[in-house]
Amino acid sequence: MRLSSRKVLSLFKRSLAFNKPHHVQWMLTRRCNYRCKSCDVWRNQKPTAELSTEEVIAGLNVLRKMGVIEIVLSGGNPLLREDIGEIIEYASRYFITTIYDNGSQAVRKINALQKADFVAISLDTMNEKKYDYLKGVHGAWKNAVNAVQTLHTQGITVGVSPTISQLNMHEIMDFTDHFTERGIPVVYCLYQHDTLEQPMFQIGEKNKELEIMDNEALAKIWDALIEKKQKCQGILITRKMLNTLKGLYLNGQRPWECKALQSFFTIDPLGKVAGCHLQNPVTTVFDLPEVWNSQKFESLRKMYRECKSCSYMCYMFYSLHANVQGNIEIIRDQWKNAKIVLPTRRH
Ligand code: SF4
Ligand code: SF4
């Protein structure tokens, strides 16, 4: 992560601004070269248009003026875009910029990734055969492990991002140990499938094999991670999230209000904006400033606050840690990890 003092100051100021959308997920493309069991993206890959480089940069300028702090570039596989280097370079000037890769592109696009603040490589298990099966691609495990190792060696801030499902949940603690002991942080995802019809961007495919069946065992994992967080660095999930997940899986408690279109929103490859990928688009990134304070958006926020249609971890996180207080909570919780996610850079 290259945090110049100018960027730190600007991020700090934005993080203290009330009622701003601090987190954005931009799904830059639907294209993907993998065939994951958990995912719907590759099943529906009609050739679709994407915003041009200039349009993405214009959109980033809009987000900057709106006070956004963090951008997650995903897809599909965003690294399949030819212009991804330019996009990362521009985004990272103003935002904490995270980019996801399935492990197939990171090494060949390593120059583009030099500017990213954080690169998350999907990897669910240390069992090669199982992982290739989950990804639907022979060699996926080797690609991912090689990508993590290569980027780490090159001084790029890289982490692994396992999607926890019934198939790998019992390995998660060993998996966590393996990487944190090597100074590589872990960012957790949880298998979910989309429940709303006609979402803006269909991602989570229903799959019985992956569905969590053993809620108590999962609650024990959240407990074990809470304990481990006290002893080691690199567990990139807050204690508040872990406790909330425990309550959700043990007792079905949902103590948070969804903050879609308030603390966060999503953008599709054409620049359409929705509260989350499961909701319908309501504007475009270019028109966003005009409608952000509108009555229409207030009504949508009210509706989303009452929505209980998903518990995708990223949206839960942005909702639980919304606004200024949420940003302070994240900093306090993750302070210990600053050393591994904010390494001293060579330039
Ligand atoms: S989960 Fe990611 S890598 Fe797998 S098919 Fe979907 S978009 Fe591609
Ligand atoms: S709970 Fe929030 S993030 Fe989930 S579907 Fe509803 S509006 Fe979207």
Image (cartoon, grey):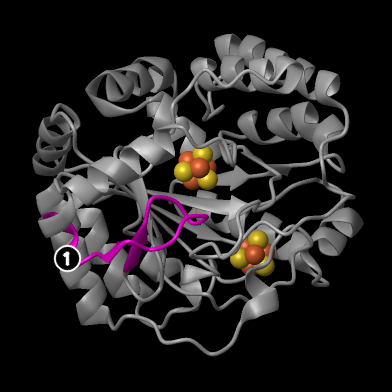
Residue 261 left/right relative to 223: left
Identify the residue shown where x is 40% and y is 73%.
Answer: 269
Depth check, front residue: 104 or 218: 218
Residue identifier under label 1 = 287
Res 224 seen here: no
Residue at 56% across / 65% down in the picture? 198
Q: Quadrant of residue 22?
A: top left
Position of residue 89 relative to residue 67, above or below, is below
* Picture quadrant of residue 143: bottom right
Query: Most extreme residue toward the bottom, as rendered?
Result: 47
Dominant secondary structure of the residues highlighted in magenta in the image: loop
Q: Is residue 213 above or below residue 64?
A: above
* Numbered disc total: 1
**Residue 148 vs residue 39, the one in the foreground:** 39
Residue 212 image point, x, y percent? 82, 36
Disc 1 residue type? Asp
Q: Is residue 173 magenta?
A: no
Q: Residue 168, percent across and down?
A: 83, 40
Left or right of 200? Residue 261 is left
- Which stretch did the figure color magenta? 272-289
Query: Which of the pair 152/249 is nearer the observer?
Result: 249
**Residue 244 image point, x, y percent:** 58, 18
Q: Residue at (63%, 18%) from the top-left corner? A: 253
Q: Is 287 one of the magenta-colored residues? A: yes
Under circle 1, the secondary element is loop
- Specify the quadrant of the image occupied by residue 293: top left
Q: Quadrant of the N terminus?
A: top left
